[in-house]
Image: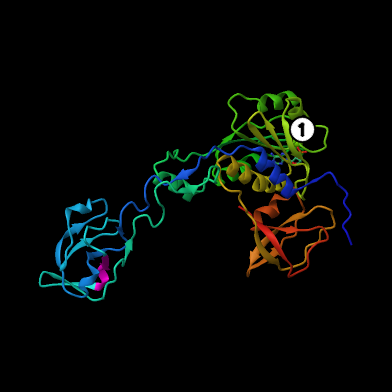
Amino acid sequence: MAMSCDHPELLPLEEALRRLWEALPAPAAGEVRADRDDPAADRAAMDGVALRAADGRRPRRLLGTLFAGDDPAAFRVESGTGVRIMTGAALPPGADAIVPVEQITDADGLVHVQVDPDPGDHIRVRGEQARAGDLLQPAGAPLTVAALGLRAQVGLPVPAPARLRVDVASTGDELVPDPEPWQIRDSNGPMLAALAHTLGAEVHRRPALPDDPEALAAALTAPDGAPILLTSGGVSMGEHDHLPSVLAGLGARILFHRIRLKPGKPMLAALLGDRLVLGLPGNPVSAYLNALLFLPVALARLQGQPPPDPWRSGRLAARVKNKGDRPLLHPCRREDGLLHPLPSKGSGDLVTLARAEACAWIEPGGLEAGAETRWLPVL
Ligand code: AMP
Ligand code: MG
């Protein structure tokens, strides 16, 4: 039976993630070509002795030693001779094989070889990885860590690693440091700052914002703002939830508002100039989970990295109900390789989230014990 859909306007999570990815610019990354043969010379792959294979096991007279970085023209290997050579050193002229140090002994001033060498043994041949001019990475390829290393190898500039700046601002008149029973402390601000830091951002905590459109507008347009602003609260349907209308009034491009996820329905993302605003819901579990889902995507895209995939898969130790029409992320402990659902009071239940190690994806209709599903590690 098809599930009924109470909220047909809600955007599926994958679609929201895709929109965010596509709306953000990746840094320009030009193509990468080999500037020279790789390796640029025949090179030792082992520490040992460079010699001529055709001499077989005949003892060799050592001419000297070549270290990585030495010019190999200092020696010329002939029949009956060899050069001690270290990994990474270029092969001296005349040599065609290396016998590793483990397979030689020194006696009577000569090197004795315990194996029958073959030409090419333990040599990285010039150009075996790439030829000068070869295309190694097309323009726009993801700037993975290895791809950055490759750029350095071919002599392209690689900027020093820097953390992307993320501003974190909570919203809500109820947030005070020393709360009366009708007030609360700001738990989202410190929590989201810690999350952004853990995800590799440089975090700036901003003062909590009142539920006031003018104060919100001023904070959103602050001239010293970061490329990413994480707010929490003020994005749902309450009379004090001003963020969507303030963003609209400032001419922001709303990427999405309201997604098909529980908790986290009010989630909003918008571009205000080049600044990304991730308007997280105020409820702490919603704020946390949406930041965990959306912030890594934004950070990766803005740094030219491949799209992150935080999901793992596992089996439930017990049944989880989901009577709603949205997929549910349910807090679990992990034990004996299984996901053990925790009794949770929902989107405000930070007590349970703080005990959880995982949040399991539960489709509408629920899942039985033993069912396999995807899950997110709780950081
Ligand atoms: P809102 O979306 O602003 O209506 O907030 C939803 C719920 O989350 C309300 O119960 C708020 O009091 C709570 N909340 C909002 N911001 C925070 C925060 N920074 N820390 C803890 N709870 C919050
Ligand atoms: Mg609020």
**Residue in the foreground of this view, choosing between 317 and 112:** 112
Tally the numbered discs.
1
Q: Where residue 212 appears, x then y in whole percent?
A: 75, 26
Give left or right: position of 164 versus 87. right
Q: Which residues are magenta?
A: 97-103
Residue 356 visible in image: no
Quadrant observed for ligand 1 in the rendered image: top right
The residue that appears at 27% across and 54% down in the rendered structure is: 68
Secondary-structure class at tag 1 = helix
Residue closest to the eye, 112 or 235: 112
Query: In this picture, is 170 found above or below 346?
Result: above
The stretch drawn in magenta includes residue 358 = no
For label 1, the residue is 244
Q: Relative to residue 216, is residue 67 drawn left or right?
A: left
Q: Is residue 101 magenta?
A: yes
Crowding at dot 1, Cα within 10 Å, few <14 / some 14-19 / many 20+, comes out as some
Residue visible at 15% across and 64% down in the picture: 62
Quadrant of residue 116 within the rendered picture:
bottom left
Pick the residue in front: 286 or 159. 159
Residue 322 in sight in this render: yes
Residue that extends furthest to the left in the rendered view of this protein: 108
Tell whether circle 1 marks a residue whose Cβ is less than 8 angstroms from ligand 1: no
Q: Position of residue 121 (x, y in %)?
A: 31, 67
Residue type marked 1: Pro
- The quadrant where residue 120 appears: bottom left
* Quadrant of image for the N terminus: bottom right
Image location (x, y in percent) of residue 259: 77, 45
Q: Residue at 77% across / 32% down in the picture?
A: 244
State the image quarter where residue 204 is shown. top right
Above or below, comparing residue 68 to residue 303 in the picture: below
Q: Position of residue 351 (x, y in %)?
A: 69, 52
